Structure formats: C-alpha cells, structure tokens
Amino acid sequence: MSSRQQRLIAVLAAQVDPRDEGEFHTYTFDMHELSMVLGIEKDERRYENIRGDLRGLMSKVLSIQKDENIEILLHFVSVAKLNKETMKIEMQVHGELRPYYLDLKRHFTRYELTQVMGFRGTYTLRFYEWLKGEEYKKNKAGWWYVRIELTELRRRLDLDARKGQPRSKMPRWPDFRRWILVPSIDELNDKTSWSVSWEAVKWSRHVGEVKFHIGPKSQAKKTPATSDDVGAALKRCSKNTRALYEQKCEEEAERMNSGTVTLNRETVILSAQETILEEMAEDILNEAEANS
C-alpha cells in the first residue's frame, strides 16, 4: 500500500462518526483539498492522481476474523463516485468496517491524524502505528524502549514473500537500513513530536534485532545514562531489585534462545543483561539515588 493510499485511510478515519447508521455510509470530499492532504502538487493532474490512488486502494482486501469460523473480506472503500466537473468525490464505507475506522480514530488524536496524513514514506505510517502501540511501556519521563527481531520487524512491514508478492523486498540488511529503516525514522523525527533513535543488535556476525528508543522531543537533548552507569547503580539497590533484575535477565535469555538462530551463550547473556538494564534503568537509578 502506497503512502498516499495510507493517507486516504487516515482521511476516512477522521470523518467516520460512531453515530453513522446504515449498512453503508457515504463521505464527501473536495478533490482540491484532498489533493493537498495527499501531497499532490498543484501542477499535477489532481483528478487522475486521486482516481489512481482510489483504484489502488479499492483493489486491497481487508480480512476481519469475526470468530474462529467466520471471516469477512472487505474493501477499504466499497464505492467511489468521482465528479470531474465539480471536483467532488464520494466514498462509501461498509458498516462492517466502521469499527476498524473508529479504532484507528481512537488510536490517534486529531493532531496525530494530521501528522499521519503528512507522511510521505511508504513505511513511515507502519512504523508509527507499531511504535504508537508500544507507548504503554513508557516510563515517567515519557520514554519507551522497544526491541524486536529483524524477522518480526520485516513481517510487520509486509516485506517478505507471500501470495501476490513472490519476492521479498530489501532482503539484505544494508538495503533495508538504507531504503526503509533510516528514511522512515528520519521522517518520524521530522514530522512528529517524537525523538526516535535506533540501534542494530548483532547475533554473532549478522544483525538479528533492532532496538528503538522513543520519547518527547523536548527531552531529546538530555544525555541518557549508559549501561555502565545503570550497572553501577544496581549495586546500590536492594536485594529484591537485584533479584528481579536477575530473573528478568534469565527470561530475556530464554526468549532469545527460542529464536530460529542458534547463539553462543556469552552473546545471549550479555545481550540479555544490556536489554534488562535499559528496561529497568529509571527504577534502578531512582532507587540508587534514594539509597545514596
């Protein structure tokens, strides 16, 4: 799905109202205004571009699993009526899709929807939705930390081969980093209120995971404590905190060993310790300071 098609979905989500009734509901847009939201320049053929984006979006099928026996297949837009004379467009959405759009609307504030509609990168919105879904992990300072296996990240971005996409996209790490990861994170930093940084984690000789730190830009210039700082602070914490740290390290090491790639024990232990130190950093530093 292209970035403009993703923005079309965001535009529809902003218009859907829980009070809408009926099996179908129609939403009307001015093509001149819509083209500005979609990033179509003034000198481009607005009608033809919007028509092309709609045709592409309407070719996509969304699967809704109602229960273990019932699956519903729907299009994001059921019917689209374009008027070249008035430059108006009517988009009709099936009632079964209303909860999907309302969930998207609830997931983002109006300000965030405006940000989303400004994304130009094809994968920026997917990164944004995923990292937004991890926001519940943020600490008191407003920062959160996410670590994900590269294979799972590629799956979330829909890059691997599948039916209708016989070849994987950007299978090599250097290409993935250059053409997908870096541009997407740069755009998030440029167009959102977040400060996002990332780091590749090597498993033996190849990249196996990617770590992300996300927080408010207002605090982006603060220098975070290093793992050595947190490790030193841990020694000044209570016995219970140190035991919790050890338990979490064991659980993280077990998770890493459950992957498809076999890692040597030293790599697993060091990586697990680093991960848990980052995860517990704020609590450890606060407790160590209180005990000083």
Image (tube, helix red, strand yellow):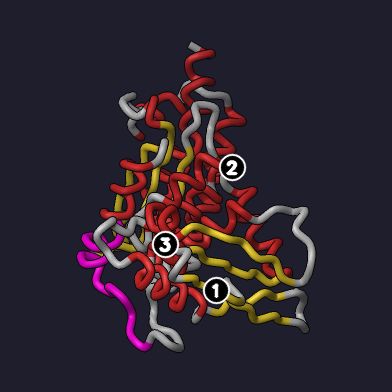
Callouts 3 and 1 close, C-beta under 8 Å:
no
Q: Residue at x 65, y 81 (%)?
A: 73
Q: Residues within 10 Å of mark 3 (few under 14, many from 20)?
A: some
Question: What type is the residue that disc 3 sits on?
Answer: Glu
Question: What type is the residue that disc 2 sits on?
Answer: Tyr
Q: Magenta segment, which residues?
A: 166-182
Q: Label 1's element?
A: strand
Task: State the mark number for residue 35.
Answer: none
Q: Residue at x 48, y 62 (%)?
A: 8
Q: Position of residue 104 (x, y in %)?
A: 60, 55
Residue identified by numbered label 1: 81
- Residue 160 location, quadrant: bottom left
Report the mark closest to the observer, 2 or 3.
2
Q: Position of residue 286 (x, y in %)?
A: 51, 20
State which tag comes first along the sequence, 2 or 3: 2
Q: Nearer the viewer, residue 251 or 117?
A: 117
The total of numbered circles placed on residues is 3
Task: State the mark number for residue 149.
Answer: 3
State which tag comes first along the sequence, 1 or 2: 1
Q: Residue at x 57, y 24 (%)?
A: 238
Task: State the mark number for residue 136.
Answer: 2
